[in-house]
Image (cartoon, rainbow, N blue to C red):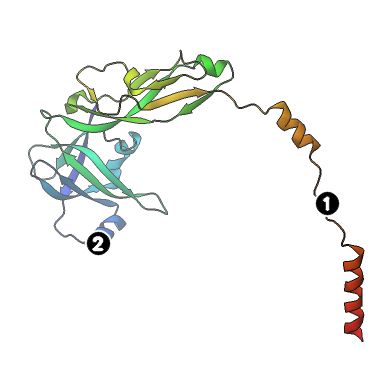
């Protein structure tokens, strides 16, 4: 499992006002919690570039090197808050872990192959993009790979079909569908004929009696 290092320093002042001041200086407010630890930290925005390359994935072990501390903390990304307008990172939550204790994390599903059913005109429907697993932090897979080459039209691939990953337990419902191949719905001949033979809507004229009454009313107004 890949590990990266990020530098951080402790925050002396807290509050929304202080957080805003830090952001203007290019510093991101951060908290670390878990395993009897709760720290308020700050990280220079430049340190987040490597996290961004990994899409802030929660299955990436981060060694958080804190200024003034001898040993780095092993953490996972727990939450990322973005500015709704600029999409810049506003806040980060990290979860402190022990490399000797199992954790539950979400891992992306990686699709391999092109289904036979798609080659025959079917449509691939993707239902699940990630899967929750439990394992030691050092055993967290970067992704779970599923081969969909043998799927025919009408077939589905479920969680139960995923090949076993060593030292990793999948926590999802075995019956959950990951992908399926559906047939393309074709328009029936009867529907096509009905559409072709459909007559445009015609605005009917008023009956002569009604038209005559309207004219009499109009004359009465003028009189």
Q: Residues within 10 Å of mark 1 (few under 14, many from 20)?
A: few
Percent position of residue 98, x then y:
11, 33
Q: Earlier in the sequence, mark 1 or mark 2?
A: 2
Residue at disc 1, secondary structure: loop
Residue 165 is tagged as: none
Q: Residue beneath label 2, please?
A: 16
Quarter location, residue 12: bottom left
Residues under labels 1 and 2: Cα distance? 65 Å
Report whether 96 appears left or right of 153.
Answer: left
Identify the residue shown where x is 91% and y is 84%.
222
Percent position of residue 33, x then y:
15, 45
Percent position of residue 122, x then y:
56, 21
Image vertical order of residue 37 relative to residue 223, above or below? above
Quarter location, residue 190: top right
User: Which-is-in-front pick, marks 1 and 2?
Assistant: 1
Q: Residue beneath label 1, please?
A: 202
Viewport quadrant of the N terminus: top left
Mark count: 2
Identify the residue shown where x is 56% and y is 23%.
183
Percent position of residue 16, x then y:
24, 61
Image vertical order of residue 124 relative to residue 31, above or below? above
- Residue 177 seen in this snapshot: yes
Viewer-nearest residue: 16 or 8: 16
Viewer-nearest residue: 34 or 73: 34
Quarter location, residue 2: top left
Residue at disc 2, secondary structure: helix
Identify the residue shown where x is 88% and y is 78%.
217
Viewer-nearest residue: 159 or 132: 159
């Amino acid at each position: 499992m890949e590990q990266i290092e990020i530098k951080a320093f402790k925050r002396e002042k807290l509050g929304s006002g202080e957080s805003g001041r830090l952001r203007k200086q290019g510093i991101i407010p951060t908290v670390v919690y878990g395993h009897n630890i709760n720290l308020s930290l700050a990280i220079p925005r430049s340190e987040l570039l490597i996290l961004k390359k990994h899409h802030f994935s929660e299955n990436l072990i981060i060694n958080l090197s804190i200024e003034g501390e001898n040993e780095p903390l092993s953490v996972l990304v727990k939450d990322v808050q973005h500015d709704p307008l600029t999409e810049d990172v506003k806040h980060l939550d990290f979860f402190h872990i022990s490399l000797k204790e199992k954790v539950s994390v979400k891992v992306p599903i990686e699709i391999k192959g092109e289904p036979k059913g798609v080659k025959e005109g079917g449509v691939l429907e993707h239902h699940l993009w990630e899967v929750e697993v439990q394992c030691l932090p050092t055993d967290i897979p970067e992704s779970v790979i599923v081969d969909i080459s043998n799927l025919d039209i009408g077939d589905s691939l479920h969680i139960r079909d995923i090949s076993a990953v060593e030292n990793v337990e999948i926590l999802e419902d075995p019956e959950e569908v990951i992908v399926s191949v559906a047939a393309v719905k074709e328009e029936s001949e009867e529907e096509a004929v009905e559409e072709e033979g459909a007559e445009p809507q015609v605005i009917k004229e008023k009956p002569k009696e009604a038209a005559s009454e309207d004219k009499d009313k109009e004359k009465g107004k003028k009189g």
